[in-house]
């Protein structure tokens, strides 16, 4: 993070007037008192901002690559009462967002509404109630049952509202953690479906998550000034070993079968830690 | 109060009034709303980034990394209404630490631009790096922001 702190030279101008006692002539003297402090520029590392994609976009990419619906693999809405720390709440807000997207895109209407209710509950705990309430989401979801296209636009609107809320309240770091939960859940669903039936397109999408992983780790590290997320960062860095060989310049990077299996196991372990399974 | 006290009070008011920062209006919500209109009907909102600046006696740069997924379509939008003039926005295919990076898009404001909203739809989706640059300035205490917003379309 690049911060530049500069102690600015301070100039205090004071006017003073001197009057001669009992005399007809008045002399005025303006004195400027300049107090300067040394200018110190503390050079820190260059700052790069890392934009993370929306979980909805990743979910749509995976769906288009063949992510089919498997029942009972998503995180149970009833588990929401188990998440009592902000850490768990933020991560699982992401998890449930990914689950809701998964259900919406596979026309699982009741499940989608259940996840929306779960997200409302969690958003209250995270003091983000305004987002859910202001959009009339339940009514909009119910009104667009079966219309996947409209439903994904509604979810995109929700993402925008959430980003606006986090920006306005200086909570950008929360967005990275929520995204981490959603990203891990989407990879979990992707690797689960691929385990059932190998799908090269899905493997391609799993492979290109290497670029997201780098940005995600960097983004969390930037904001983790109090080492609150050290364990999560370590776990995410562990995933990096599976993406060995990835380079941004390489367009056709593809995980081999062994790497896909390893990724699946790592994601399953990490996801279990987050959802408490 | 004698005259000496009056003049001290006036001087104090003068000092504090000149210490007030002058700013451009960085109303993020309004700036973003102008951009989201440009997404419909084909693109869905994906992500956004706000970059804030304070003019100083040193030139400033900032880099923003954007991950894009291959084969998909994206629309990148910038709202510079709240940015002091004489800025540059460039998009490259590699970070500034890399050699031989390719310039994919640029907006250079020399104070004569009439528009505030700029659009870029990449021909090829790949990770991209936005570079913002503001030159050194004799002015100080002026700050502003640029809003970046991106939409996607699954092909």
Image (tube, rainbow, N blue to C red):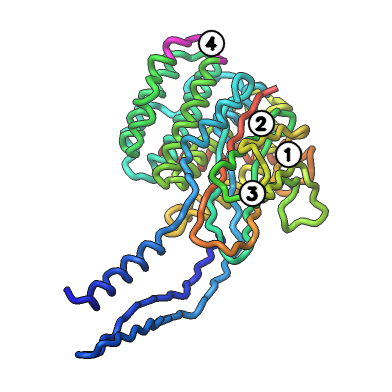
From the viewer's perspective, tell me whether residue B97 is left or right of residue A223.
Answer: right
Quadrant (top left/top right/bottom left/bottom right) for the C terminus of chain A: top left
At a point 33% along the width and 71% down the height, the residue shown is: B11
Mark-to-mark CA distance, 3 and 4: 37 Å
- Give the residue pinned by disc 2: B75
Badge 2 and badge 1 both on one subunit: yes
Q: Residues within 10 Å of mark 4 (few under 14, many from 20)?
A: few
Mark-to-mark CA distance, 4 and 1: 30 Å
At a point 39% along the width and 42% down the height, the residue shown is: A88
Mark-to-mark CA distance, 2 and 1: 13 Å
Q: Secondary structure at mark 4?
A: loop
- Give the residue pinned by disc 1: B126
Instruction: Tell which subunit mark 3 falls on.
Output: A
| Rendered location of residue A265, percent (x, y) | 58, 39
- Give the residue pinned by disc 3: A240
Q: Secondary structure at mark 1?
A: loop
Camera-side mark, 2 or 3: 2
Magenta stretch contains residue A225 = no
Mark-to-mark CA distance, 2 and 3: 29 Å
The magenta stretch is: A141-149
Mark-to-mark CA distance, 4 and 2: 24 Å
Badge 4 and badge 1 both on one subunit: no
């Amino acid at each position: 993070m690049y911060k530049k702190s500069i102690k600015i030279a301070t100039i205090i101008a004071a006017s003073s007037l001197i009057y001669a006692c009992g005399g007809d002539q008045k002399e005025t003297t303006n004195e400027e008192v300049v107090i300067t402090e040394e200018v110190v520029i503390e050079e820190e590392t260059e700052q790069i901002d890392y934009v993370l994609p929306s979980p909805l976009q990743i979910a749509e990419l995976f769906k288009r690559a063949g992510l089919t619906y498997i029942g009972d693999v998503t995180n149970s809405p009833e588990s929401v009462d188990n998440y009592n720390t902000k850490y768990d709440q933020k991560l699982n807000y992401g998890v449930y967002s990914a689950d809701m997207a998964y259900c919406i895109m596979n026309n699982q209407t009741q499940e989608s509404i259940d996840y929306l209710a779960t997200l409302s509950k969690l958003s209250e705990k995270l003091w983000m109630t305004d987002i859910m309430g202001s959009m009339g989401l339940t009514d909009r979801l119910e009104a667009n049952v079966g219309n996947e296209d409209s439903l994904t636009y509604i979810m995109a609107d929700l993402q925008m509202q959430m980003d606006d809320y986090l920006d306005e309240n200086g909570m950008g770091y929360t967005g990275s953690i929520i995204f981490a939960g959603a990203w891990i859940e989407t990879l979990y669903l992707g690797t689960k479906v691929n385990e059932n039936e190998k799908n090269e397109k899905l493997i391609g999408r799993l492979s290109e998550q290497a670029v997201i992983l780098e940005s995600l780790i960097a983004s969390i590290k930037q904001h983790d000034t109090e080492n609150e997320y050290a364990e999560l960062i370590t776990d995410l860095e562990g995933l990096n070993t599976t993406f060995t060989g990835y380079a941004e310049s390489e367009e056709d990077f593809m995980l081999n079968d062994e790497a896909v299996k390893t990724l699946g196991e790592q994601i399953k372990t990490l996801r279990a830690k987050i959802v408490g399974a | 109060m004698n005259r000496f006290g009056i003049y001290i009070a006036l001087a104090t008011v003068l000092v504090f009034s000149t210490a007030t920062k002058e700013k451009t209006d960085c109303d993020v919500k309004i700036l973003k709303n102008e951009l989201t209109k440009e997404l419909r009907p084909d693109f869905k909102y994906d992500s956004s980034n706000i970059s804030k600046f304070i003019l100083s006696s040193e030139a400033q740069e900032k880099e923003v990394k954007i991950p894009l997924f291959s084969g998909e379509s994206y629309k990148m939008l910038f709202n510079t209404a709240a940015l002091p003039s004489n800025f540059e926005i460039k998009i490259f295919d590699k970070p500034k630490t890399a050699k031989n990076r390719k310039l994919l898009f640029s907006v250079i404001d020399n104070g004569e631009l009439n528009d505030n909203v700029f659009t870029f739809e990449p021909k090829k989706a790949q990770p991209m790096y936005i570079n913002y640059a503001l030159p050194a300035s004799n002015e100080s205490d002026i700050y502003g922001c640029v809003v970046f917003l991106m939409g996607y379309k699954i092909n």
